[in-house]
Image (tube, grey):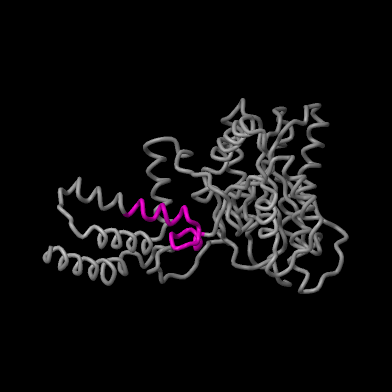
Amino acid sequence: MRYEAAGLTVLYVLTFLIVLPVLCSTWRYSVYYRGAESTDENDPSVLSYLSDVMTSAVNDEADERPMFLLVTIVTVRREGHFYLSRVVARLHQLLSAYNGGHGNDGVVRAMICNVDRDPQLHQEALDLQTIYPVVRRDGQPAISHGDLMDKEKDDYIFCLNASRHYHDQISIKKRQSSGTYYILVLEDDAVPLDDLLPVTRRLIDYLKMRRSDDHQDFFYVKLYHPERLQNYWQPEPWRIAEWMAVSVLSVFLLQVVLGLRLRRHSLWIVYFMALTECLGRPHLLQFKRWIFARLASPAAAYNLLAATECCTPAMLFSNTSAYLASAFLSSITCKRGYAKDTALYLYARQSGRQAFVVEPNLVQHIGRVSTLRFN
């Protein structure tokens, strides 16, 4: 036992003072990360891709399949930052592949919702209207700095309503029944990841089945939660339970695989708890996604959990819950400390409505310029 204690001391020193600081210095979500943030937001390949798409633009509205999902990108001007272009380019790639390979699933469409204070000056959105239809919020009242949170809420309401109106227009034009459909609201700094559409489709199918069992529709599903809030050292009880379970399982495997006889189990559990937290839980989630992509269905790597409060870069609604969210947000005033994400979260909890979050994330948040200030 004495030798085990000495070995543990050496292992702690080697792991946390030597190995991990060197190994994890470039791991963005590790406690040892020392690199600078980089998003490659002005990647010239993005603009080149969009230029090619504009040149050979195909009218997606010619597709006669019913729309089951509308992706709406909420955007404002961010001078010198081509966030919207990057989101549209990636989304176009994913939609083209998905719509071409899922003939019986219905079609996914996209639109851009321009809510800039001077929408006619949002040149980036204007340039992209040859790819996706653009709606704009005209006639906005003058606002002060203190009203920016409420403006963001009003912008969200406008885009939810515009999404429902756009779907109804398409349905009438194509003489299709307007049953249940879904709206995915992306903010213009949320770049879709590869699994976005197939996982969202599987998620919708699961929620439909769940609704048929308990007759209750979901309120919203968040497809993004900030990585800095995904580590184990967070207030959610289930996360602490997962942390303990991973650590206990690691000690068990250490004994079974290597045949070690460990006696100081509590110290080994603390070791693995510290190890996983220092590595960063987001990296463990990415590793899990990588494993499932090679051994099983990629969608199996994703979990549906009870929603947390922050944030709204990617939110999935049904047409019914979009109407409900719009009506609720129209009845309140947002301010610092009570933004739209907090308001929706508290409303869901107080009304008993189901709100979820997906892990790992299905979008990458690239925003470094806040919309909650004057340009």
Tell me which corner region of the image, top left, top right, bottom left or bottom right, holds residue 60. Answer: top right
Residue shown at 79% from the left, 47% from the top: 162
Left or right, 94 with respect to 324, comes to left
What's the magenta region? 227-247
Viewed as shown, does residue 135 lie left or right of 300? Answer: right
- Can you tell which quarter of the image residue 346 is in? bottom right
The residue lying at 64 percent from left, 30 percent from top is 212
Up/down of 95 relative to 137, above or below: above
Residue at image point 40% right, 68% down: 33
Q: Point out residue 354 in the picture as x, y percentages from the top left corner.
A: 63, 45
Q: Residue 54 in the image: state x and y as whole percent.
A: 68, 46
Q: Look at the picture and state if 342 lies above or below 355.
A: below
Q: Is residue 234 left or right of residue 220?
A: left
Is residue 233 rendered magenta in the image?
yes
Above-or-below relation of 164 to 145:
above
The total number of labels drawn is 0
118 or 162: nearer the viewer: 162
Our reading of the magenta stretch's main secondary structure is helix
Q: In this view, does 341 lie to the left or right of 226?
A: right
Q: Please report the residue visible at 15 percent of the width from the left and 53 percent of the height from the top.
A: 261
Give x and y (percent) for residue 326: 77, 50
